[in-house]
Image (cartoon, rainbow, N blue to C red):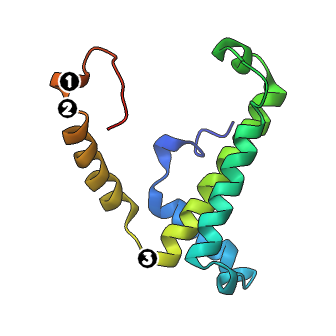
Amino acid sequence: MNSDICDANKTIDFFKKEVEEFVKNRQWSKYHTPKELAQAISIESAELMELFLFRNYALEEILKNPELLSKISDEISDVFIYLLSFVNALNLDLTTAFQTKMEKNRKKYNLQEFSNGFYKKK
């Protein structure tokens, strides 16, 4: 793998611009409405879930299976690409949205109540 192309060397802005250019060059913006993009994210997420349907892979099993890892990587990338298209369509700042939500999560799942591995949906 090219060491210049990795998470540590790319910004959210890089990904947003890559997706924006890809969509613009194909004149797909008219199809990238919030409804269509939300549905596309859900569909691609379902395709990711389908890889695990009726299977109970252990983590080690997945990591030792290059073909499965490749399929997972493709589906995760599809979800990410549509998510970035959605962010672009709404002109959202993903970093701000992330930080705001993480602060809400820290309050909702505070360390006093959730530091022992216990999880329950609130």
Q: Residues within 10 Å of mark 3 (few under 14, many from 20)?
A: few
Per the image, the residue denoted by label 1 is 113
Q: Nearer the viewer, mark 3 or mark 2?
A: 2
Q: Point out residue 121 in the picture as x, y percentages from the top left corner.
A: 37, 35
Callouts 1 and 2 close, C-beta under 8 Å? yes
Q: Earlier in the sequence, mark 1 or mark 3?
A: 3
Residue type marked 2: Asn
SS assignment at label 3: loop
Per the image, the residue denoted by label 3 is 91
Q: Is residue 92 above or below residue 118?
A: below
> In front here: 31 or 42?
42
Q: Point out residue 2 in the picture as x, y percentages from the top left corner.
A: 66, 40
Per the image, the residue denoted by label 2 is 110
Q: Is residue 61 above or below residue 98?
A: above
Residue located at (46% from left, 76% from top): 90
Q: Is residue 7 above or below residue 33?
A: above
Q: Point out residue 78 in the picture as x, y percentages from the top left corner.
A: 69, 54
